[in-house]
Image (cartoon, rainbow, N blue to C red):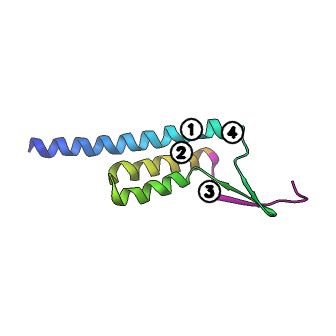
Amino acid sequence: KNKKRRGKNKMENLIILGFAIGIILDVVLAFFNKEKDASIKISNYSFRIHHCILGIIAFILAIFYSPYFFISFGIGIILSHTIRTKEFKIVEIKRIKNGK
């Protein structure tokens, strides 16, 4: 019985840790990317990859590695980014007018 409880504690800790790291990473990335234009310009379009993509990558990693950690990390980063920006975006595509 004690071994089962220890395993459950480890699982709960991984979930909490992943969620917290996801939120913290979102806040840190938002702080450092505030001043920069991180968009890629191709032809008449500008592409900006939001760091929500890290959450999607974490979901894929959860298939192969620690699912409790990576799923909660992905949820943490996506939820934090969505609450902060009030929208869910992974890639933002804008048409560039007059070469600007």
Residue 42 in the image: x percent, y percent?
Answer: 76, 61
Nearest to N terminus: mark 2 or mark 1: 1
Mark 1 to mark 4 CA distance (whole Å): 11 Å
What is the span of residues highlighted in magenta in the rendered image?
85-100
Magenta stretch: dominant secondary structure: loop
Residue depicted at x 69% and y 47%? 38
User: Which residue type carries mark 3?
Assistant: Lys
Question: Which residue is tagged 4?
Answer: 34
Side of 80 where 94 appears, left or right:
right
In the image as oriented, which residue stretches furthest toward the right? 98
Question: Which residue is tagged 1?
Answer: 27
Residue 59 in the image: x percent, y percent?
Answer: 43, 57
Residue 98 in the image: x percent, y percent?
Answer: 91, 59
Specify few, some or many for label 1: CA neighbours under 10 Å numbering under 14, 14-19, or 20 or more: some
Residue 22 in the image: x percent, y percent?
Answer: 47, 43
Marker disc for residue 82? none
Nearest to N terminus: mark 1 or mark 4: 1
Mark 2 to mark 4 CA distance (whole Å): 16 Å
Question: Which residue is tagged 2?
Answer: 80
User: Which residue type carries mark 1?
Assistant: Val
Question: Which residue is tagged 3?
Answer: 89
Task: Name the mark nearer the viewer: 3 or 4.
Answer: 4
